[in-house]
Image: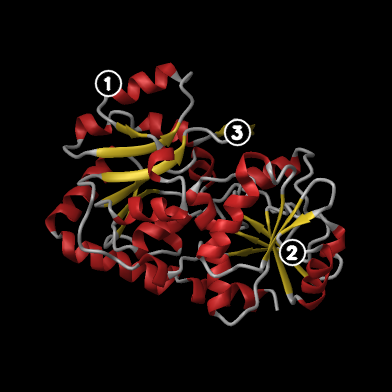
Amino acid sequence: MIADTPHRGGATWAILQYLIGLRSLGCAVTFVEPVEEPLRDGRAAYCARVMSDHDLSGQWCLVSGDGTTIGMERSELRAAAREADVLINVSGMLTDLDVLERIDRRVYLDLDPGFVQMWHDDGVDMRFDNHTHFATLADNIGSDGCSIPTCGRTWIPTLPPVVLAAWSPIAETARDSFTTIAHWRSYGSIHRDGVVYGQKAHSVRAIVDLPQRVDERFDLALDIHPDETRDLAELAANGWALIDPDQVAATPALYRDFVRGSRAELGVAKSGYVVSQAGWFSDRSACYLASGRPVVAQSTGFERRLPTGHGLFSFVGVDDIAAAVETIRADPCGQRMAARAVAEQHLSAESVLSRLLENIS
């Protein structure tokens, strides 16, 4: 999550929010990540630098494929596991029984709802075993209108935490545009009961003419393969401005600067989150809100938990985006303040993680 995908500032921040947030609650935190080849591509060095930059030196460990460790000695890792009250296991990635079996409460944290559960239903080992609790960003799982299977588990809905102190708003903007940072594709889509649970590519294609219909600049820091020639041509023809994410989001600091320097976010979701009505909300959008940057986010059913209309707006189609853009233009200062207020009231790491810990106590 940090070392195995180095130089992706957004992915790094998604985990740092938990580490820093738990620490702010008074928890002693240890970060452990399984990495097949920790020395390749400077992975261990990147992780060490991130941990040092956020006062987590000495509190991290990479476990390689052969069981050796970097950062902490194996004996130190065992001791940390013995003393731990809770393991929060992102996507169940940590499978080292030497660690798992020393911790009584083991939480499977699902950050990719719908896909995880459907793959499990299709017989893929999603590493549910050896966990005592299950938490998910699918806020609507198990409710009417949400098509995500529960897989016989009781899921604890949770929101993406954001460390407010790390995302204090700034007055100036570096880009007079709506921006976002995204992967065009992450993996294959799922076809189930006549429904396609797709990727971000499918969602953007549905609004590809947006810059032609709304008088606004939309900048996408988009990780898209150059072989996607048809989509690249469509994006360019319709007026989307594409930015190399390696230039603006390769480190946590660059990622934060890009978010805070934007005027607002256009948050497009994977189509799988949309059609399942998961209630998923983006950790990236949480960062924009905390930075006092209004967010126009594609509807996934998150409106059942988060207030919209001031600072945060949801959209189904282009007309909704156009209306939100006009509202933000009419009162930019007020909408910035409202955006920060949504983060403070609903997404602060302290409140989100306190609730999560209470639910697994």
- Rendered residue at 72%/72% (across/down): 86
Q: Considering only order in the chain, which callout, 3 or 2, is on the residue closer to the N terminus? A: 2
Q: Is residue 98 visible?
A: yes
Q: Secondary structure at mark 1?
A: helix
Left or right position of 89 against 81:
left
Question: Hey, which quadrant is residue 71 in on the image?
Answer: bottom right
Q: CA distance from mark 2 to mark 3?
A: 33 Å
Q: Secondary structure at mark 2?
A: loop
Residue that sits furthest to the left in the current view: 330
Residue 176, compared with residue 138, is above or below; it is above
- Rendered residue at 17%/59% (across/down): 332
Q: CA distance from mark 2 to mark 1?
A: 51 Å
Which quadrant is the C terminus positioned in?
Answer: bottom right
Q: Which residue is mark 1?
A: 237
| Residue 3 percent location from the top left of the image | 62, 50
Q: Which residue is mark 3?
A: 187
| Residue 351 percent location from the top left of the image | 50, 76
Q: Which residue is mark 2?
A: 72
Q: Secondary structure at mark 3?
A: loop
Q: Amino acid at mark 2?
A: Met
- Rendered residue at 45%/71% (across/down): 348
